[in-house]
Image (spheres, grey):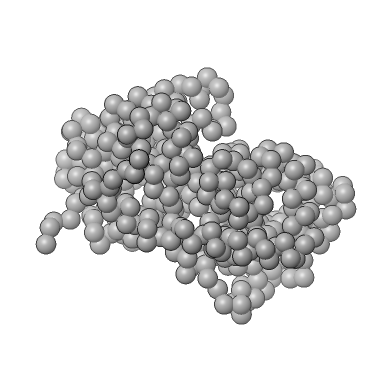
Amino acid sequence: MAEKKNVLIISASGNYGGMEVHILNILEGLHKDFNFFVVCPNGNIVSEYEKYAKVIKLFPKFDIDPIYILKIVRLLRILNISVVHTHELKAGVNGLIAASLLRLPLKISHQHTPISNWQVMSLQKRINALVYRLSVNKLASFEVALTSEIEKQKIKEGIKKEKIMVIPNGISLKTFNFPRKLKIKYRIEMCDKYGINPQNLIAGCISRLTVEKGHNVLIKALREMENAGSLSNIRFLFVGEGELRESLVRMVNSYNLANKVIFTGFVSEEEKVKILASLNIFIFPSLAEGFGIVLIEAMSVGLPCIVSDLPVLKDVAKESVLYFNSGEEKSLKEKVEKMAKSKSLREEFSKKALQQVKKYDIKKFWENYKKLYENTFSIPR
């Protein structure tokens, strides 16, 4: 039996989000095939990582941090690492430099959301894109893209086509497949916890409370609905935590929507599943995404979804969701009203979502990463 390879995963975040769940899914599915080590700061997902990997809590203080790089070099030597897999820009650049200093044969980078989609100043975006392009083209063996649309964007950003591997996210479909009685139980439990009348329609948005997730667009759409008198029987759950929490709460209060919008804060994976089972409609108003793993989780529950029309999300969901014009509250208002008024429309999109999400079975995700770490992944052209 061949000795298992040692794989070092490097991330600049230890808190729950799409990227971090992506890493957790890799660890969960492949820990019997590889010895995993994870470098990341402390956070609320670290205890989950530790079920499958040895975690080393480090964080780069600077965009290029010599001390951090030297610590990674030392780890690579001591742990006899064969594969380095970096996630996002800061961890990616520093990790690739460290791995290249030791001439490791397999160096994988993964910028989940293309830099061209970042909600930052134009000059900063251009500088980041330049650093990213140089580090990947010069230092990485491969760059991962989550969809073919993201692959196109990375090529436009200057990443060499031959470097890019397309590996879509995956989820365990059975995790989100509930019998009707369990759904009802979860709904009663969540309604009781968050003070919602079970007779109301419940719409939800699950993500970090950050600029690129578009919560302000949704709140403005809710104000438009309130002014039009179409919000009376709907309640909205904003699930997640982040730097915009206080400003979003102030925004909700200033629009007199506090009796319609509930901020749950951070929730466990178990509670997130219960919340998804409790919703009638899922809303995904992102301004920028690398994939949107929570979207396919919502689809796997059979939720009708209202989604911003970003190219990457259209690539993921195809015709199985209802799209609105990204960043436009009036367009979002119209789609929420349309979905809320029509039970038959909700049932139609529920069926479409359940059919489309079958493409994202976690087993294919694991198979692709196993091939990549073994360096036997082939790129169809």
User: Residue 74: image x %, image y %?
Assistant: 20, 38
In which quadrant is the C terminus drawn? top left
Asked if one can make out residue 265 in the rendered structure from this viewpoint, the answer is no
Q: Is residue 377 left or right of residue 18?
A: left
Asked if one can make out residue 106 in the rendered structure from this viewpoint, the answer is yes
Q: Is residue 97 left or right of residue 44?
A: left
User: Residue 193: image x %, image y %?
Assistant: 66, 67
Question: Can you say whether 66 is above or below 42 in the image?
Answer: above
Q: Is residue 9 left or right of residue 344?
A: left
Quarter of the view holding residue 277: bottom right
Point 56% across, 64% down: residue = 354
Question: Can you say whether 148 is above or below 277 in the image?
Answer: above
- Camera-nearest residue between 206 and 297: 297
Point 47% across, 69% down: residue = 174
User: Residue 62: image x %, image y %?
Assistant: 39, 28
Residue lying at the far front of the rendered structure: 381
Residue lying at the far top of the rendered structure: 123
User: Residue 331: image x %, image y %?
Assistant: 75, 43
Point 23% across, 48% down: residue = 376
Point 69% across, 40% down: residue = 325
- Camera-nearest residue between 107 and 188: 107
Residue lying at the far left of the rendered structure: 1
Q: Is residue 302 left or right of residue 342?
A: left
- Camera-nearest residue between 66 and 378: 378
Residue lying at the far bottom of the rendered structure: 181
Across the whole image, how many numbered discs are drawn on residues? 0
- Camera-nearest residue between 347 and 26: 347
Quarter of the view holding residue 366: bottom left
In which quadrant is the N terminus drawn? bottom left
